């Protein structure tokens, strides 16, 4: 079992009361002979990279360890006030990982048993206490948002344990006045450790995939997964539509256009990987956004000078939608919040139309450019984060994406680059002017 007390919390404030409580609990634990498990107490510099480095070292280079860690509790009690108002439980991990629901239930049950109010995702306790549709919808939406942006937002500490099957939560005291003091706050980790100490095996009897609606209400994966599956299937249907609803549907699978489409897809995947690696080494958000903004105008700029075969245009759209559908389907079980957010934000791609040869009107081209800009992975992600997340304003998002990969091994950057960008590039290429290939004309084959 692990007790973690960072010197500075997620806001960069000195965790004075938390450190004091951690030292007191260390002395208290050492005097009890009832422990059947080792207790490790860590005081990292911060709850982000410093704590993550210690966890990685514990599982790799440290010679003296206390065995596998079953659970970790992070204490966040900033300031020097003895009293606080309520407790917030933070549980989102990196890459969609969540602690076992039993650990969250233990924290909530103990806090409420001690008379404390429990908050989730920064929602005021009074709002949660309303216990109506809108309060639960708010907690649900914030849970999806925080899960999708885990590793990019402020790091509370529990995220540092993702990837090693360590169940972890962060307990944060809010307010400077209230009926509860630091001693009451210390009873939560103490009682949680006694509960974990009684376990004969690892957490496995409850849910690992869930969304909380309130401290004591949740939605299981069987209830929320179908909505994301529907969105994933919509891209598969769009792919099927580009195969059936055109005059080239009778082309064989070994057609040169299918092979050329797969070759272009491979090139787009390689290019996306190169972009991801180059940005990690030389991050330049302005250049990335400017390039992303200019690319959709490319088909209009080369109008009449560069064309592709008409059947190839359809095949590029087919491969783009099919690949994105497969990415979403694979991501659903691993990181539902990110998969759900990507499917919603990228949905405008399905409205991009392949313009008939010789009928490319200015209005239709403008509509395609607008839809491509709206569904570009970097532009869309940047706009959405600036809208919904105060911690990621301006170009801070891109520096956080790089830091999340380098410091925390968070996959979000590569999911965007390798899962979303290749499909968008193929879709942009499909909007180029086309020419009819006589060899693939259905009329010639019929004759």
Image (spheres, grey):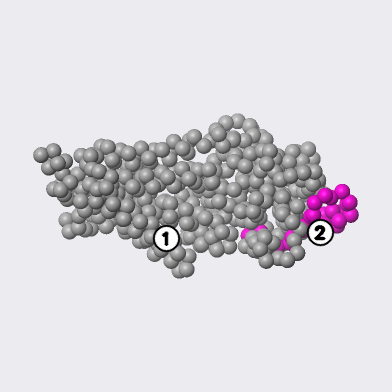
Residue 359: image quadrant is: top left
Residue placed most toward the observer, 313 or 147? 313
Magenta range is: 23-48
x, y percent for residue 22: 79, 56
- Residue at the image point whose x is 65% and y is 50% from the top: 165
Q: Is residue 184 left or right of residue 78?
A: right
Tag of residue 100: none
x, y percent for residue 311: 22, 47
Residue at the left extreme?
Answer: 447
Residue 129: image quadrant is: top right
Residue pointed to by mark 2: 23
Q: Is residue 113 left or right of residue 158?
A: right
- Residue 40 painted magenta: yes
Mark 1 surroundings: few (<14), some (14-19) or many (≥20) residues within 10 A: some
Residue placed most toward the observer, 56 or 254? 254
Residue 234: image quadrant is: top left
Residue pointed to by mark 1: 273
- Residue at the image point whose x is 54% and y is 46% from the top: 334
Q: How many numbered marks are there?
A: 2
- Residue at the image point whose x is 77% and y is 44% from the top: 200
Q: From what the image shows, is residue 48 above or below residue 124?
A: below
């Amino acid at each position: 079992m692990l007790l973690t007390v960072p010197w500075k919390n997620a806001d960069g404030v000195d965790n004075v009361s938390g450190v004091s409580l951690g030292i007191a609990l260390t002395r208290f634990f050492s005097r009890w002979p009832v422990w059947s498990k080792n207790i490790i107490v860590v005081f990292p510099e911060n709850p982000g990279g410093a704590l993550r480095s210690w966890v990685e070292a514990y599982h790799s280079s440290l010679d003296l360890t206390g065995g596998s860690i079953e659970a970790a509790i992070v204490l966040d009690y900033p300031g020097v006030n003895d009293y606080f108002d309520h407790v917030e439980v933070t549980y989102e991990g990196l890459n969609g990982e969540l602690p076992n629901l039993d650990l969250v239930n233990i924290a909530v049950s103990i806090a409420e048993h001690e008379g404390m109010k429990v908050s989730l995702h920064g929602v005021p306790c009074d709002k949660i206490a309303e216990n109506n549709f809108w309060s639960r919808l708010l907690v649900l939406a914030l849970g999806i948002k925080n899960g999708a942006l885990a590793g990019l937002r402020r790091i509370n500490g529990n995220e540092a344990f993702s990837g090693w099957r360590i169940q972890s939560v962060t307990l944060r005291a809010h307010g400077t006045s209230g009926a509860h003091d630091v001693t009451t706050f210390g009873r939560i980790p103490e009682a949680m450790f006694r509960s974990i100490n009684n376990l004969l095996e690892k957490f496995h009897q409850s849910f690992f995939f869930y969304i909380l609606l309130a401290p004591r209400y949740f939605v299981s994966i069987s209830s929320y997964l179908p909505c994301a599956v529907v969105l994933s299937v919509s891209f598969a249907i769009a792919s099927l539509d580009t195969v059936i609803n055109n005059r080239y549907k009778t082309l064989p699978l070994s057609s040169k256009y299918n092979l050329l489409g797969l070759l272009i897809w491979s090139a787009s995947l390689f290019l996306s990987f190169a972009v991801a690696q180059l940005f990690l080494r030389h991050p330049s958000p302005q250049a990335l956004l400017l390039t992303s903004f200019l690319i959709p105008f490319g088909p209009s700029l080369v109008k009449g000078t560069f064309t592709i075969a008409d059947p190839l245009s359809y095949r590029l759209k087919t491969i783009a939608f099919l690949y994105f559908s497969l990415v979403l389907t694979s991501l659903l079980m691993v990181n539902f919040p990110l998969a759900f957010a990507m499917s919603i934000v990228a949905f405008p791609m399905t409205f991009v139309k392949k313009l008939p040869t010789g009928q490319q009107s200015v209005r239709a081209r403008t509509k395609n450019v607008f839809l491509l800009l709206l569904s570009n992975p970097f532009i869309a992600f940047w706009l959405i984060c600036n809208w919904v997340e105060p911690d990621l304003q301006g170009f801070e998002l891109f520096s956080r994406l790089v830091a999340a990969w380098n410091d925390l091994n968070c996959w979000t950057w590569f999911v965007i680059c390798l899962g979303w960008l290749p499909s968008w590039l193929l879709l942009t290429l499909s909007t180029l002017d086309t020419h009819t290939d006589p060899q693939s004309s259905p009329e010639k084959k019929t004759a």
